[in-house]
Each structure stands twice: as C-alpha cells, then as structure tokens.
Amino acid sequence: MKIKKQEVELRMKHFETVCRNKGIKLTHQRMEIFSEIAQTGDHPDADQIFQRVRDRMPTISLDTVYRTLWLLNDLGLVVTLGTSREPTRFDANLNSHHHFVCGQCGFTRDFYSTELNNIRLPDSVDSLGEIDATHVEVRGVCRECLKKGG
C-alpha cells in the first residue's frame, strides 16, 4: 500500500525540520531510509528496508540502516511495532491510528477509528503512570492467508 504523495511530502518535510532543529546531518542514506518508511504502509522491518534501499543504493550497509532507524526512533520520527519475539517494524505515520496484524504472515496495516482513539481506559491504568497514547493492535488472519486455507 503506497501512501498519498502529499502525505509523504509532509512526512519528509517534518523529517528535515526535526533533523535541522536537532543538528542532525541530512545525509543521503538517512533521507533514503526515512523515505522508504514514509512512503509505504506495510511497516517494514530493518531487513526489508535494507533490501529496498539497497536497490537504489548498492553500497549501503545493514548496520547503517539499523543505526539510522534507531536514530529516527529516538528523534520521534518513527515508532516501533512488534513484540520482543518478532522483528521490530517501523512506522512513519505519527497520526493517531491502530494496526491489523496477520498472525500467520505478519501482514501489518493501519486502520483508523475515532471510537478506539477515545477509548476510556480503566482507572487502574492511570495508577501505572501517565498515558501518552493509546494504540490498539488487532490480530487475526489476513485475506491472503484465508485464501490459502489459513
């Protein structure tokens, strides 16, 4: 799923602004890596990003991709998805949204829900700490896996 050109441009502009404000160099590698995440809705993991960027930049290393992804995460330009048992996936969509994840193939896509954005959490959650955001992850079997008999 490709993201609308206008949204990608907004994400790239935000990326450039944050990097400039934090004194982070806008290297070609960093721009290509962020662009790869910004233009796709499949929430790729580091290896997928590496493969895709390497098609355009054959000299890029996997280490550069990992270091850049964690820098982008530290700068608040991407968020990470997944559990400790799965590869970490990266998402440049910082708007309030939720995820559908296929438990068989890992297919991950955004979905939007005003109801879930406004979900009332139990008081017991407040006792754990201050809530910054609520994210719902729905797990199931995607259409492709269902077609294959999943």
Image (spheres, rainbow, N blue to C red):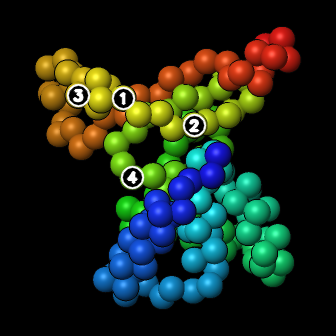
Which is nearer the N-term, disc 2 or disc 3? 2
Please identify the quadrant where the C terminus is shown: top right
Mark-to-mark CA distance, 1 and 4? 15 Å
Q: Is residue 142 above or below residue 55?
A: above
Mark 1 or 4: in front is 1
- C-beta proximity under 8 Å, tags 2 and 1: no
Q: Amino acid at mark 4?
A: Leu
Which is nearer the N-term, disc 4 or disc 2? 4
Q: Residues within 10 Å of mark 3 (few under 14, many from 20)?
A: few
Q: Is residue 4 above or below residue 104?
A: below
> Can you identify the residue that label 4 sits on?
94
Mark-to-mark CA distance, 3 and 1? 9 Å
Q: Residues within 10 Å of mark 2 (few under 14, many from 20)?
A: some
Mark 3 or 1: in front is 1
> Can you identify the residue that label 1 sits on?
113
Mark-to-mark CA distance, 2 and 1? 13 Å
Q: Amino acid at mark 2?
A: Arg
Going 63% across and 64% down the picture, which residue do you hit?
36
Going 29% across and 23% down the picture, which residue do you hit?
115
Going 36% across and 79% down the picture, which residue do you hit?
17
State whether residue 75 appears in this view.
yes
Going 24% across and 43% down the picture, which residue do you hit?
132
Q: Amino acid at mark 1?
A: Ser
Mark-to-mark CA distance, 2 and 3? 20 Å
- C-beta proximity under 8 Å, tags 3 and 4: no
> Can you identify the residue that label 2 sits on?
109
